[in-house]
């Protein structure tokens, strides 16, 4: 088993970036959402954690607890 943590995909309608560190991904999303005044999503690479930011604040957080479940 690997000790590497999954990265986070930070995206808005104009740009997408993969960031390894959770805190850095959240900070980037807060900055983008406050500067661009549009929603920014952060999704863990394995798809189990999803966050949405608007105007620099968290508006939605989903943590998928069932490994095989799909939306």
Image (cartoon, rainbow, N blue to C red):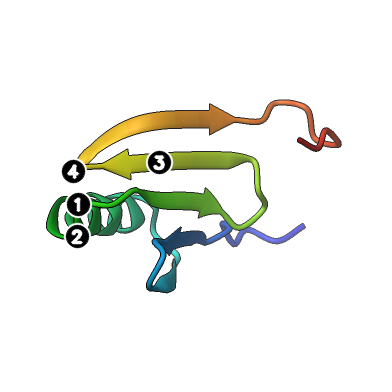
Residue name at image x 44 percent, y 40 percent:
51
Give above or below for 46 relative to 13: above
Mark 3 highlights which residue? 52
User: Is residue 39 rendered to the left or right of residue 70?
Assistant: left
The mark that comes first in sequence, 4 or 2, is 2
Q: Nearer the viewer, residue 42 or 19?
A: 42
Looking at the rendering, in which quadrant would you find the N terminus?
bottom right
Q: Which mark is residue 37?
A: 1
Q: Which mark is residue 36?
A: 2
Q: Disc 3, disc 1: CB below 8 Å?
A: no
Question: Of discs 2 and 3, which sits in the foreground?
Answer: 2
Mark 4 highlights which residue? 56
Q: Nearer the viewer, residue 49 or 22?
A: 49
* Disc 1, SS: loop
Q: Disc 1, disc 2: CB below 8 Å?
A: yes
Spatial CA distance of label 2 from label 3 is 14 Å
Locate residue 17, reporting x and y percent.
Answer: 42, 72
User: Is residue 10 rendered to the left or right of residue 5?
Assistant: left
**In the displayed image of the protein, which residue is found farthest to the right?**
68
Disc 2 crowd, CA 10 A, few/some/many (<14, 14-19, 20+): few
Residue name at image x 59 percent, y 62 percent:
4
Looking at the rendering, in which quadrant would you find the C terminus?
top right
Q: Quadrant of residue 62?
A: top right
* Disc 3, SS: strand
The mark that comes first in sequence, 3 or 1, is 1
Q: Disc 4, disc 3: CB below 8 Å?
A: no
Question: Of discs 4 and 2, which sits in the foreground?
Answer: 2
Q: Quadrant of residue 15?
A: bottom left
Spatial CA distance of label 3 from label 1 is 13 Å
**In the displayed image of the protein, which residue is found farthest to the left?**
35
Residue name at image x 44 percent, y 51 percent:
42
């Amino acid at each position: 088993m690997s000790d590497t943590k999954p990265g986070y995909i930070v995206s808005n309608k104009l740009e997408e970036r993969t960031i390894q560190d959770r805190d850095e991904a959240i900070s980037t999303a807060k900055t983008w959402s406050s500067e661009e005044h549009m929603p920014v999503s952060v999704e863990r690479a394995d798809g189990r954690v999803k966050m949405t930011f608007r105007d620099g604040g968290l508006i939605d957080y989903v943590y998928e607890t069932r490994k095989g479940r799909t939306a």
